[in-house]
Amino acid sequence: MADVRSAHTDPQHREQPPARPEEGSGPPHDRLATAVPLSRPAGREPADARTPGLTGGAPGEAPARRGFVALDVGTARTRSVSSGGCAIADRPSAVVGRPSGVPGPVRPIRHGVVADPAAYLRLVRLVLLEARWSGAWPPERVLTGVPVAATPDDRRAVSAAVAEVAGCEATLVEGPLAAAVGAGLNVTGPRPCLLLDVGAGLVEAVVIDGGVITDAAVLQLSATTDTGLPLYALDGVVDMTAALLRRLPGRLRSAGLVVTGGGARQERLLERLRAALRMPVGAAPEPEHATIRGLVSLCPQPVPAARATARGR
């Protein structure tokens, strides 16, 4: 069964670069990532028109840091983009090797947060390796998404892995806020935004006002299927979202609800939401990539990114 938990939010709330894997080592999902063209919301400029290369000073000096990496590590899929990149690297959120020796991949993320820190570190190292070969190494910053309800320990686990692999601080952005930016919503405008992010292990419904998440509800999923959310989970998502909306003034409903994440492609979910909420409900373009697009947009904007992460530090 699904575990529903409501999160009321407060608006203020070196290691050396990794070596290239040996040819043929690990299963295909450990070596290869699907490249998806990076599209951006209309009106948004590319995050960085340049592709930074490896730079360095005199012998013995540390290389100059430039560029960024955007990183979205989900329960089922991990997406990343390096500065100047024109494609999203999309791979399973899995690595090889269990301490017990039991064969099979290890999935370090559960319900959107780190469940296995050692495996998460291996996954981050694998993903950031691609940034090195693209020329964005060492990065000046790494922006990565975290759930709204991520605990301080959850956030520290993410920051520690990025610091160990990339040698720079991780800027943590709440995933639904990044998804809203990636969906083209005006998150700092005068009208609040309503967004539902439907992932493989976590569903988050949020209200965004003034560039921060002011209210949220969270649904943890125990399982998904190849065709998306199971029937009982659909009901849970609808009930959770309806409960959040009941806490809001009626005027906020006129703007409608935007749905992101892979689950946004389930038309039956959208139909149930429209019927139950009696308000406009629509999926963002390429909804599964909304979060990574938002992170890319925020990377070169230190002030908005800092504001977006003020509660997470």
Image (cartoon, grey):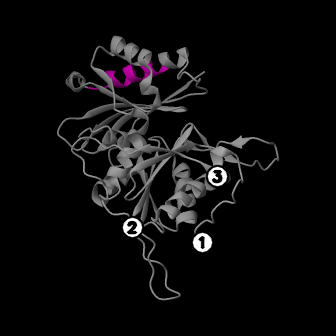
Of marks 2 and 3, which one's residue comes earlier in the chain?
Answer: 2
Of the pair 12 and 233, the residue shown nearer to us: 233
Q: Name the spot of residue 15 as percent of width and height, x first.
A: 60, 70
Q: Nearer the viewer, mark 1 or mark 2?
A: 2
Q: Is 246 a magenta residue?
A: yes
Label 1 and label 2: CA atoms lie apart by 19 Å
Is disc 1 in contact with disc 2, using a CB cutoff of under 8 Å?
Answer: no
Find residue 87 and name its label. Answer: none
| Residue furthest to the top | 275
**Highlighted magenta segment, given as a residue range:** 236-248
Q: Amino acid at mark 1?
A: Gln
Badge 2 element? loop
Q: Residue 248's image quarter?
A: top left
Of marks 1 and 2, which one's residue comes earlier in the chain?
Answer: 1
Find residue 117 and name its label. Answer: 3
Q: Residue at x 47, y 40 (%)?
A: 149
Q: Residue 287's image quarter?
A: top left
| Residue furthest to the front | 23
How many C-alpha atoms fall within 10 Å of the one at disc 3: few (<14), some, or many (≥20)? some
Of marks 1 and 3, which one's residue comes earlier in the chain?
Answer: 1
Looking at the image, residue 164 sits to the left or right of residue 50; the answer is right
Q: Amino acid at mark 2?
A: Pro
Q: Name the spot of residue 293 as percent of width and height, x first.
A: 37, 45
Q: Name the spot of residue 43 as percent of width and height, x first.
A: 21, 44
Q: Is residue 213 visible?
A: no
Find residue 52 and name its label. Answer: 2
Look at the image and tell me in which quarter the C terminus lies: bottom left
Q: Nearer the viewer, mark 2 or mark 3?
A: 2
Q: Is 277 a magenta residue?
A: no
Q: Name the spot of residue 48 as percent of width and height, x first.
A: 31, 59
Q: Where is 179 relative to 232, above or below?
A: below
Look at the image and tell me in which quarter the N terminus lies: top right
